[in-house]
Amino acid sequence: MESERILARAEEALRRHGMEPRLAQRARAARRRSFFGNVKRIALVAGALMIGLPLWGLIIAPVGTTGLMIAVLAFIVAAVVLMAFPRTPLVTGEVLPTTELALLPLKTEEWLAGQRRALPAPATRLVDGIGLKLEILAPQLQALDEREPVAADIRRLIGDELPELVKGYQRVPLNLRKEGLNGISPDKQLVEGLAVVDEELDRLSKQLASGDLNRFATQGRYLELKYQGDTA
């Protein structure tokens, strides 16, 4: 089956790049950075209160029990707010269609990392493989003109169609994802859709690489004709 062949290729790619999927590593690293960033900010608030309260008592007026309770309450509120609203907002699927093309692959990869836990196991293997292809694609887009037809294809694929595929699956009730209705399994549809995205990313990356290789070969030939031809 086509989707099984793609899954095997994705697993082989992941084995070549390490035991743990890179997308999972990035998701865990992002969660760790967010957590420790919030802890640091909360510690700064606590330090400000520990320094500010004695100074208030020395310079302005005694803090008293009421003031201390207000300070504790303010610290609790600040801690809850800081944990609820991380400093670096998570990438949402809604911003991907308008993201600058050069940033789109890594933004899409970051968004996928956040969706990984909500997907079935076969789909996560494909998503990890897609993440690797997005990392490869990112440097190829740095100098690509957005008016090129291939640029429009890439934007449509990873900025619109891929997010809509994943979000469409997530809108299906949990109890219907395996069996679905009328024998159509959303789990299977998701895997097959991701397999198509994986194949298309590979094709687009090779198309871009082909253009770069042709330009490089042309430049090399030009230099040979210009300098070796002159000496001849």
Image (cartoon, grey):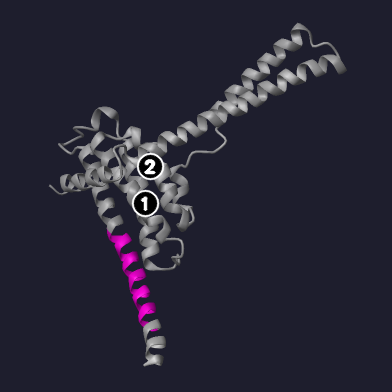
The residue under label 1 is which amino acid type?
Leu
Q: Which quarter of the rendered picture does the C terminus lie within?
A: bottom left
Q: Residues within 10 Å of mark 1 (few under 14, many from 20)?
A: many
The residue under label 2 is which amino acid type?
Leu
> Who comes first in sequence, dot 2 or dot 1?
2
Determine if the magenta segment contains residue 214.
yes
Q: Please tell me which residue lies in front, 153 or 28.
A: 28
In the rendered structure, find residue 171 and report the number of the disc placed on it: none
Q: Residue at x 59, y 26 (%)?
A: 81
Kindly identify which residue carries mark 2: 112
Secondary structure predominantly adopted by residues drawn in magenta? helix
Chain part drawn in magenta: 203-222
Q: Residue 142 at what x, y percent from top left?
A: 46, 61
Left or right: residue 27 compared with residue 51: left
Q: Residue at x 54, y 38 (%)?
A: 88
Q: Are marks 2 and 1 in contact (CB under 8 Å)?
A: yes
The answer, for residue 20, to whether it is visible in the render is yes
Tag 1 secondary structure: helix
Tag 2 secondary structure: helix
In the rendered structure, find residue 134 and report the number of the disc placed on it: 1
The answer, for residue 60, to whether it is visible in the render is no
| Residue furthest left in the image | 1
Q: Quadrant of residue 113?
A: top left
Determine if the magenta segment contains residue 84.
no
Q: Residue 28 at what x, y percent from top left?
A: 41, 33
